[in-house]
Amino acid sequence: MSQNPIQVTVDRLKRIAHIPERAPRKPADAGTCPKCQSHFSSEEMVANARVCTNCAHHFAITARERLDHLAGGHDEWREIWTELRASDPLQFVDLEPYPDRVRKAEQSTDLGEAVVVAELEIEGELCVAAIMDFKFMGGSMGSVVGEKIARGCERAIELGVPLVAITSSGGARMQEGVLALMQMAKTVVAFEEMADANLPIIVVLTHPTTGGVWASFAALGDFTYAEPGALIAFSGPRVIEQTTREKLPDDFGKAEQQLLNGQIDAVVDRRDLPARIGKVLRICHRPDLAAQPPLANIISQASGERMGRIADAVAETITQTLPKLPKKIADRVAKAIEPRGGDDR
């Protein structure tokens, strides 16, 4: 055996250049923009959906404020499942017990959990909305968050309406361990049930959307929008830089970069979200289709006489709408749509 001692190190700082520290963010209160230092009154901030009128910086906004904004400021929305609360199955304690953290979050935000599910109308179109609030324990997804989102999908299916999900989260809630990670699969299954019911899902990604939320239901919307400057990534840039010891570009994970990468459909200003979502809801609203039986059932139940009429209608349509076809192709089409004599099935 070799007498030379083996030295192992995981510190790569000696082999790479020094990574400069990121410039600290300027502190901002409710009426001062951290980007342009403009000042606003509280009434102006509320009227402008907490977006700077000078540089369009998007301030943090609560879940209930978002619901008011989407509903047109008329408080015409109904919150559901407000009674659900987190339990402590793991008896988790870090600097303080998990129940104490939840209790403090409830008192500071006046919320029961990090997501608010409500029924509301956006631009006159009924939908179910699931709005996450980052102020409640970083918008972390625990058992109750997953349950409320799953119930929101079930309620949307019951009403036959779309689901609007607005995310703002740091990921799965570590105080609930694997139970929180299980909500990733639970929410994905709930979204699949929406797809099976042919109901659309609109997802709006806001700052920040990271971790298990982005790795699960937040990436499964039929229409996926993001607010300007929102961080959308599985891991934040600081975590990656500290792990890899490499400098990342300033636009890493930002909404605009995710748009270029094809991860989202559009970057939409918060003030334009009600109109954009309302337009999508109107496009997807097809009440007449729900009352119609599937085409396969119509064909299977049709008699031979009805099938003959359908064939005649198809032939007439081809004659009127298509340009003149070569005789060889026209003969094949006529032969294909000609009713079979003596077959009434």
Image (cartoon, rainbow, N blue to C red):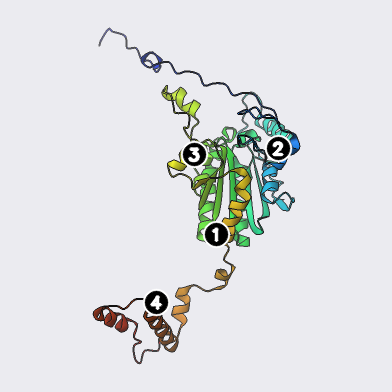
* Disc assigned to residue 256: 3
Residue 251 visible from this viewpoint: yes
* Residue 321 x %, y %: 39, 77
Quote the CA–CA distance across marks 2 and 3. Answer: 24 Å
Quote the CA–CA distance across marks 3 and 1. Answer: 28 Å
Point out the frontmost of discs 1 and 2: 2
Identify residue type, mark 3: Glu
Q: Which residue is mark 1?
A: 199
Q: Which residue is mark 2?
A: 45
Most foreground residue, 308 or 184: 308
Earlier in the chain: of badge 3 and badge 4, it is 3
- Contact between marks 4 and 1 (CB within 8 A): the answer is no
* Residue 178 x %, y %: 53, 37
Quote the CA–CA distance across marks 3 and 4. Answer: 44 Å
Point out the frontmost of discs 3 and 1: 3
Q: Which residue is mark 4?
A: 321
Identify residue type, mark 4: Thr
Quote the CA–CA distance across marks 1 and 2. Answer: 34 Å
Identify residue type, mark 2: Met
